[in-house]
Image: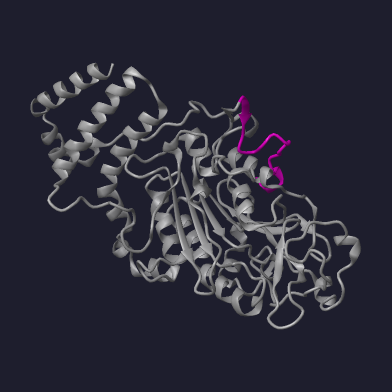
Amino acid sequence: MRQALALNRRSFFGKSAATGLSTIALASLLEPSLLNAAPQKGVLAELPLPQRAKRVIWLTMAGGPSHLELYDYRPKLAEMDGRPMPESLTRGQQLAQLQGQKLVCLGPQFKFKKYGQSGIEIGTLLPHIGSVIDDICLVRSMTTDAINHDPAHTFMNTGSQISGRPSMGSWITYGLGSETADLPGFIVMVSTGKGRSPQPIAMRQWSSGFLPSRFQGVQMRSRGEAVHYLSNPPGVSREQQGAAVEAINDLNRLLNSVDPDPEIETRIAQYEMAFQMQVSVPELMDLSTEDEKTISMYGCQLGDGSFANNCLLARRLAERGVRFIQLYHRDWDHHSLLREELPLRAREVDQACAALIRDLKQRGLFDDTLIVWSGEFGRTPMSQSNKGPVGRDHHNKSMSMWLAGAGLRRGMAYGATDDLGYAAVENIATVHDLHATMLHQMGIQHNAFSFKFQGLDARLSGVEGARVLTGILK
């Protein structure tokens, strides 16, 4: 077999001049689509449900933002400030760093205000999000299974605390494919708050896990060169690069015809994608084409790597057909310095989140884009420190998040926590419920969407009986 492949390879290179590879590569400069792979198709030829969302923009506030200062005002907690936490709520419960310590209530550290015609009450640290509250569905009864950062991110992204499972972006591009041929279907960007040292974000959070690797998320940097090795080496022209790509892929196709392998197919697709990205990515990242009004609306400095900059890029990615866009903004882990640091993080994201909603609406993209704003868990109603700069510990029994667009009800607050904000008690929602709802809006029946792995039908929404949150849907 090796000898046959070697002969085919020699024959191929011997005939390469006659095949006109250099001509094809040159033509691709004039018409880039000539060397385009077709948009990647998903495995779902037909969708069993109406597709309300064509794409997802997931805004991840990494570190665990405090819902008790931002989205869930608890008057009783304010009244109990400085008093012991009722043991009836916390006895036998899992805590992170407060386990075994004296538990003291910490009231809201910032004011709340009612916004919009809906009159939904959120923290005054988020006035811009308040200005679009009538376009948002706020969920105050979210819960999660994990209580520390990495497993909580893994659970939120994959539906499992076990590393190695596919991320939600990979599941969706596996099912639906991509609407673009010259950009990856799943793109991730990371920004960092101007504060303390933030928790790290592992690249495996956007891994394709046991799905074919062509569905893995691709991280783009919003400062400097967006993707490593995007430019050709000195002395290598685009015609030469195109000829090399075509030659390598012909060899890969030959090998795949002998021994079919999904990873060889991935390699072929990724070579073609990388070649196209050399043209498409610089154009994508050139924000100088945006008008001053739009830039001012987002409040960003072009190319500064900020969350605001990434939100503007997210809109451009949505326009270009990218299926799943995930933005991480780090440094929300406020065990202390809550009063000092939380306003800074809120200011870094507030205006851009509202601008993204407005921008998508004015471009006709809001109604088929699912926007999600979430951390990996909530924060405790108990103080992390009773002396000095106060903060809140990790908490998994209550958290707030919001969704917008794509068939979601607008100007709605869904669910509730108890009087102290300790646990969700009304319309309790789980991460699996969230994933099931997300898939439902994408036109996918969550409990029938699976991949055979280690003899089991693995699902993003798990096998524990997830439900679609119909109460938040139009």
**The image quarter in which residue 458 lies:** top right
Quadrant that contains the C terminus: top right
Q: Examine the rendered structure and indicate whether residue 61 appears above or below residue 212.
A: below
**The image quarter in which residue 20 lies:** top left
Residue at the farthest left position: 18
Q: Examine the rendered structure and indicate whether residue 116 appears above or below residue 396.
A: below
Q: Is 211 on the left or on the right of 70, as rendered?
A: left
Q: Examine the rendered structure and indicate whether residue 220 appears above or below residue 349.
A: above
Q: Is 89 on the left or on the right of 364, as rendered?
A: right
Q: Is 384 on the left or on the right of 80, as rendered?
A: left
Looking at the picture, how far across and down is residue 210, in whole percent? 52, 34
Looking at the picture, how far across and down is residue 289, in whole percent? 29, 62
Segment tinted magenta in the rendering: 455-474
- Residue drawn at 56 percent across, 51 percent down: 405
Number of numbered discs on residues: 0
Residue 470 magenta: yes
Q: Is 394 on the left or on the right of 92, as rendered?
A: left
Residue at the farthest front position: 3
**The image quarter in which residue 181 lies:** top left
